[in-house]
């Protein structure tokens, strides 16, 4: 199986432990974390033609991934 790019551990390598802790203690964070992985894997499957999609759908998936990533980034920033 090929490597899935844009995994959160790669995107936020210094925050892996913090993400694990937030997943365990914050249900909202756990939800957006899981949604990010679902969308990211759907994008990867489309890009590798495992599950091809049209340009409009791909654009929407990428926008969704970016919004989720922004939410995750905000949750990781010190309060």
Image: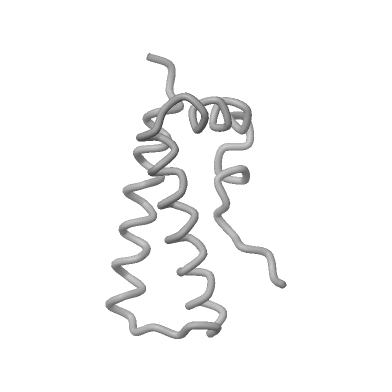
Which residue is at 57% across, 79% downward?
Answer: 48
Q: Residue at x 38, y 55 (%)?
A: 65
At horizontal 54% and vertical 32% (from top left) the residue drawn is 19
Tell me if residue 42 comes above or below residue 34 in the rendering.
below
Q: Quadrant of the N terminus?
A: bottom right
Quadrant where the C terminus sits is top left
User: In the drawing, does residue 40 fall left or right of residue 13?
Assistant: left
Above or below for 14 versus 45: above
Q: Please state the horizontal and vertical placement of residue 41, each as a whole percent of the image.
A: 51, 64
Closest to the observer: 48 or 50? 50
Pinpoint residue 70: horizontal percent, then vertical percent. 36, 41
Against 62, is 7 above or below? above
Residue 78 in which image quadrant? top left
- The quadrant holding residue 12 is top right
Q: Residue furthest top?
A: 79
Q: On the picture, is 29 further left or further right than 22?
A: left
Closer to the camera, 69 or 50?
Answer: 50
Total marks drawn? 0
| Vertical comparison of 8 with 25: above or below | below
Residue 3 is situated, as x and y percent measured from the top left of the image, at 68, 64
Colouring used for the render:
one colour
Which percent across, then down, holds residue 8?
55, 45
């Amino acid at each position: 199986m090929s490597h899935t790019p844009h995994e959160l551990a790669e995107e936020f390598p210094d925050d892996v432990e913090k993400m694990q802790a937030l997943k365990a203690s914050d249900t909202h964070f756990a939800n957006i974390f899981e949604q990010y992985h679902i969308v990211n894997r759907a994008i990867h499957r489309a890009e590798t033609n495992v599950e091809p999609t049209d340009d409009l759908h791909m654009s929407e998936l990428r926008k969704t991934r970016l919004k989720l990533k922004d939410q995750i980034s905000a949750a990781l920033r010190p309060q």
